[in-house]
Amino acid sequence: MPNFDRDLYNRDGCQLLPGLLAEADVSRAVAFFDGLDGAAEVPPSYEAEYDEADGVRRLRKLRRLLWNDPQIWGPLLNRAGVPALAREVVGDDAAVVFHAAFLKPALVGTEVALHQDQALWSYEYPKAFSVWCALTEVSPANGGLFGSRGSHSGGHVPHKDRPAYRWHDSLDAAEDGLEEPVQFQLAPGDGVMWDRYFAHGSAANTSPHDRRGMVVVFADASAPEFRAKDSFPLADLVALGAG
């Protein structure tokens, strides 16, 4: 199991997970996404989004990975020890509610403005947390990944529509009284986990190199208020690693 520090996680709303994915699994994931990025057509079940500029169109986001290809992603997530993290943070009734790839392609990858995940979700996901896995180097040079430590402590912060940003409502750290976001410097295979109210985002990728990552989100499926479009029980995920 990855080295989980509950006190650190509770204080900051996030924790780095160095070496979460083995090199072979990083290569498997990158090859998988390369294949879809180069395909003439991506199956609708991935709910793909694209970045496009100057006639270049590249995959930006893929969704429902575990539901589309459980025999690929189930064993990989088990090898990374992610189910053990879900038990620590949520408990035995944890379920995957999202599993997506963020591909931020070279030169055209757009920013993801500062936001809290729960503020953008259609449902309330009790105890939800995310595990974000770097599949390439992640640094300010290729768009990076940043977050505001402690931003989870007050729960939901109202988000605003910002006309210059087209994807979703967002936050401004100074305006909303949050700590200045800090950059996560990640090598391929490193991870970072965060609370559903942890404010985070990333910049545009103006470099010649793709910045690729993958995120899996768990929530408490036993909570009375739990609702989900997709729900993959922890027990079923663990079973995929048994073979």
Image (tube, rainbow, N blue to C red):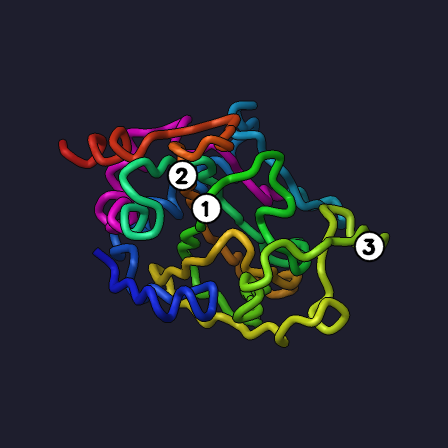
Q: Is residue 160 left or right of residue 234?
A: right
Q: Which numbered mark, 1 or 3, is in the foreground of this view?
A: 1
Q: What residue is pinned by disc 3?
A: 162
Q: Position of residue 224 (x, y in %)?
A: 46, 31
Q: Magenta span covers which residues?
A: 58-84
Which of pointers 1 and 3 lies earlier in the amino acid sequence? 1
Name the residue at 24% across, 50% down: 81
Outermost residue, right side: 163
Which of pointers 1 and 2 lies earlier in the amino acid sequence? 1
Amino acid beneath label 1: Ala
Q: Is residue 170 above or below residue 86?
A: below
The numbered mark at residue 220 is: 2
User: On the rendered image, what quadrant is the N terminus found in?
Assistant: bottom left
Q: Is residue 183 above or below residue 210?
A: below
* Mark pair 1, 2: CA separation: 7 Å
Q: What residue is pinned by disc 1?
A: 128
For numbered disc 1, what is the local secondary structure?
loop
* Residue 239 image-quadrant placement: top left
Q: Position of residue 198 (x, y in %)?
A: 54, 59
* Mark pair 3, 2: CA separation: 32 Å
Amino acid beneath label 3: Arg
Name the residue at 27% across, 43% down: 76
